[in-house]
Image: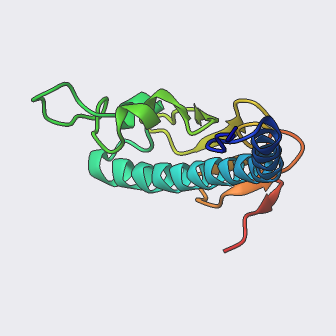
Amino acid sequence: MKKDSRGFSLIELLIVVAIILIIAAIAIPNLLRSRIAANQASCVGSLRTLNTCEVTYASTYNTGYSASLLDLGPPAAGAQPTNTAAGLIDEVLAAGTKSGYTLNYAAGTADSAGDIDTYSITGNPVAVGSTGQNYYYTDDSNVIRFNTSQQASSSDSPIGG
C-alpha cells in the first residue's frame, strides 16, 4: 500500500512556529525602541513648531505670546484667523497630546499693557518607557532642553544639534 506524502507533519509545523517565535522575540523589542525614538523625535519637532508659531503669533498680533495652545489653533470653518484662533497649528497639536507625549503650555504673566512676554512648554511621555523615555522643556528662549528621569526645566541640558 502506498502512503500519501503530501502536506506537512506536526513536527515540521512546530519547527516553523518555533522559528517564527524566535524571530518575533528578537524583532519586537527593536520595534518598541523604534516607536519610542519616533515619539521622542515627534515631540521635539512639535516643540520646534510651537516655538516658531509663538514668534509668528507675537509678530502678527502684536500682543506678545499666546495665552494657550488653543489660541494658536485653527479658526472655525470659513472664519478668518484671529488672536484667539490664529490658524498656526492643527487641532491635534492645539489639543496638547501628540505621538505619545502630552504638551503642557504655560503662559507668563501679562504685563501692564496686557501682553504676555514669556511662555514655557513641557513635553512629558504619556507612559514612561512605553511611549517615550525623555522629558522635554522649551520657553521663549527657543532652546529645547531634556531630562531622562524627571520633568525637564530651564536648568536642564539642551538637546544636541
**The N terminus is located in which quarter?**
top right
For residue 155, side relative to residue 87 (left or right): right
The quarter of the picture where the C terminus appears is: bottom right
In the rendered image of this protein, does residue 150 appear above or below residue 22? above
- 104 up-or-down from 62: above or below: above
Specify the farthest residue to the bottom: 161
Residue 57: image location, x then y, percent: 35, 47
Q: Residue at x 44, y 57 (%)?
A: 52
Residue 87 quadrant = top left
Image position, residue 160 (x, y; %): 72, 71
Determine the image quadrant of residue 74: top left
Camera-side residue of 41 and 18 = 18
Q: Where in the figure is residue 2, as x and y percent of width and height? A: 67, 41
Reply above or below: 90 against 39.
above
* Residue 133 in view in this figure: no
Question: Is 74 placed left or right of 130 in the picture?
Answer: left
Q: Nearer the viewer, residue 73 or 119?
A: 73
> What's the residue at 64%, 51% (across, down)?
138
Residue lying farthest front? Answer: 1
Residue at the spot 73% in from the left edge and 56% down from the top edge: 145
Q: How is the structure coloured here? A: rainbow
Residue lying furthest right in this view?
149
* Viewer-closest of 116 and 156: 156
- Compared across the picture, whether 46 is left or right of 16 comes to left
Pick the front one: 119 or 134: 134
Q: Is residue 117 visible?
A: yes
* Residue at the (44%, 49%) spot, across then down: 54
Q: Position of residue 39 (x, y in %)?
A: 63, 47
